[in-house]
Structures are given as structure tokens and as C-alpha cells.
Image (cartoon, rainbow, N blue to C red):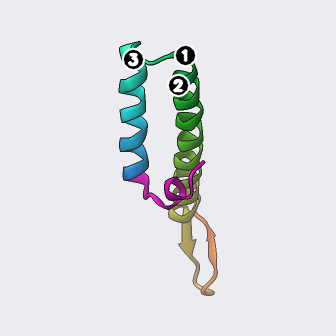
Amino acid sequence: MAKEEKELNFEENIKKLETIVKELETGEIPLDDAINKFTEACKIAEICDKKLKNATNSINKILGTDGELKDFEIEES
């Protein structure tokens, strides 16, 4: 994967992924190019997945009274 793809933010990666999907949906791309685009899309999707997981982990933390970050858990009664 090109270095520039790793430097794109989440929204830019999603737009690039959408563009690739539209290109593949046309069915007008030669097989070798389609395989390369599919591989690129999988890598972009993996980058986006990691960013979402990192964001989720960050959001699910709460600052405790002792100043430490802890996992946020809702106690159901």
C-alpha cells in the first residue's frame, strides 16, 4: 500500500473506498485491475477498521476519581 493511503484521515479513506467500489461495480475494469483494486480496498477497509476500534476504545474510557483512565461500564440493576 502506498504511503499516502496511510496518511489519509478516516473520511478520506472512506471516500477512496467508495470510489473503488463504484469502479468495481461498473464491471468495465479488466480482471487484473479489478483484483488490484479489490486488494487495495481490503487494505483501506482494514485501516478504517483499526481507526474505528481505536476511537471506540478511547471513547469507552472514563477518568476515575484517582485520575486514572478506566473502562466505562454501565451497571444494570
Q: Amino acid at mark 1?
A: Leu
**x, y percentage for residue 37?**
52, 30
**x, y percentage for residue 31?**
54, 16
Image side of residue 27 versus residue 70, left or right: left
Give the crowd class for mark 2: few <14, some 14-19, many >=20 residues within 10 Å.
few
> Who's the residue at 63% across and 71% down the image?
70
Q: Amino acid at mark 3?
A: Glu
**Quarter where residue 20 is shown:** top left
- Residue contact between numbered discs 1 and 2, judged by CB atoms under 8 Å: yes
Which one is earlier in the sequence, the residue at label 2 or at label 3? 3
Q: Amino acid at mark 2?
A: Asp
Where is 39 relative to 46, above or below? above
Disc 1/disc 2 C-alpha distance (Å) = 5 Å
> Who's the residue at 39% across and 14% down the image?
28
Q: Which residue is mark 1?
A: 31
Front in this rendered view, residue 68 or 37: 37
Where is 25 relative to 18, above or below? above
Where is 11 relative to 17, above or below? below
In reply to whether residue 20 is colored magenta, the answer given is no
Q: Which residue is mark 3?
A: 25
> Who's the residue at 44% across and 18% down the image?
29
> Who's the residue at 52% across and 51% down the image?
52
Q: How many marks?
A: 3
**Residue closest to the far top:** 27
The secondary structure that dominates the magenta segment is: helix
Disc 2/disc 3 C-alpha distance (Å) = 13 Å
Q: Disc 1 or disc 3, which is closer to the eye?
A: 1
Q: Secondary structure at mark 2?
A: helix
Q: Which residue is mark 2?
A: 33
Give the crowd class for mark 3: few <14, some 14-19, many >=20 residues within 10 Å.
few
**Quarter where residue 72 is shown:** bottom right
Q: In the rendered structure, which segment of residues is drawn in magenta?
A: 1-11
